[in-house]
Image (cartoon, rainbow, N blue to C red):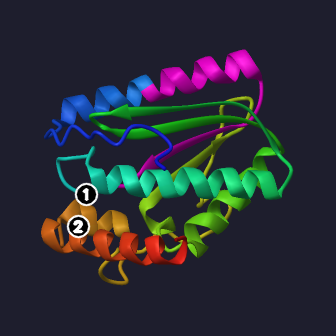
Amino acid sequence: MPLYLTCASHRVITLPELLASRDARQVRQQTWLAQYGLPLISFTTLAPGPVKDSELTRRIFNHGLRALRERLATSAWEIRRQSCLGLTTGAEGLLAVEAPAPALKQAAIALEQQHPLGRLWDIDVLTPQGEILSRTALTLPARRCLLCDNDARICARERAHPLASLLSRMEVLLHEADHLHA
């Protein structure tokens, strides 16, 4: 059963819409940090191309949210509040968690590296003071491209691969994850 509605918009998103969505996410994060004073997990799905909200991205998001909840439960960390938004700019999850922020980031990185879909998730951890704990601050390498061994940011910026190839790879990864977690 999905963790939220699966009716996706399939709408092409413009750059101004994407930037406005990121600004709105930052406002939500700051509001939650002020309200709860706890580390915050901000979770999204990485989606190449102009359509950020599709059945594919929502299914990938649902897998990620389920994996996050399981990891938090295994660590006995309490989720004080959580919210999921199915936006045209992509699904977003926020979780205020009673746990040390560095440990949360390590758990998030482990999920991103070990889960079949982890490469498709963006799991940010913010300290109660609002600092984003980054991979580079933890001296971890940049994420690799879905299709080659290059830095994913470079391939994305240069549009090194056809969108259809990237989406096809995402479908393959989702199929593998569905069979592992069936």
Image x and y of residue 114, in percent: 60, 75
Residue 173, position as x, y percentages in the image: 38, 74
Question: Who comes first in sequence, dot 2 or dot 1?
Answer: 1
- The residue depicted at 52 percent of the width and 22 percent of the height is 28
**Residue at the limit of the structure toward the bottom, as seen here:** 149
Left or right of residue 89, residue 69 in this image: right
Please name the amino acid that badge 2 sits on: Leu
Mark 2 in CB contact with mark 1 (< 8 angstroms): yes
Q: Amino acid at mark 1?
A: Pro
Q: Which residues are magenta?
A: 25-47
* Circle 1 Cα neighbour tier, 10 Å, few/some/many (<14 / 14–19 / ≥20): some
Task: Indicate yes or no whether the magenta region holds residue 85.
Answer: no
Q: Residue at x 46, y 28 (%)?
A: 25
Q: Quadrant of residue 38?
A: top right
Q: How many marks?
A: 2
110 vs 118, left or right, is: right
Residue 102, percent from left and from top: 77, 51
Say which residue appears at 53% left-offset and 56% top-offset.
Answer: 64
**Taking 8 as reference, is 179 above or below it?**
below
Q: What label sits on residue 128 in the rendered view?
A: none
Q: Evaluate whether residue 39 shows in this view.
A: yes
| Residue bearing the label numbered 2 | 167
At label 2, counting other C-alpha atoms closer than 10 Å, the crowd grade (few under 14, some 14-19, many 20 or more) is some
The residue labelled by disc 1 is 48
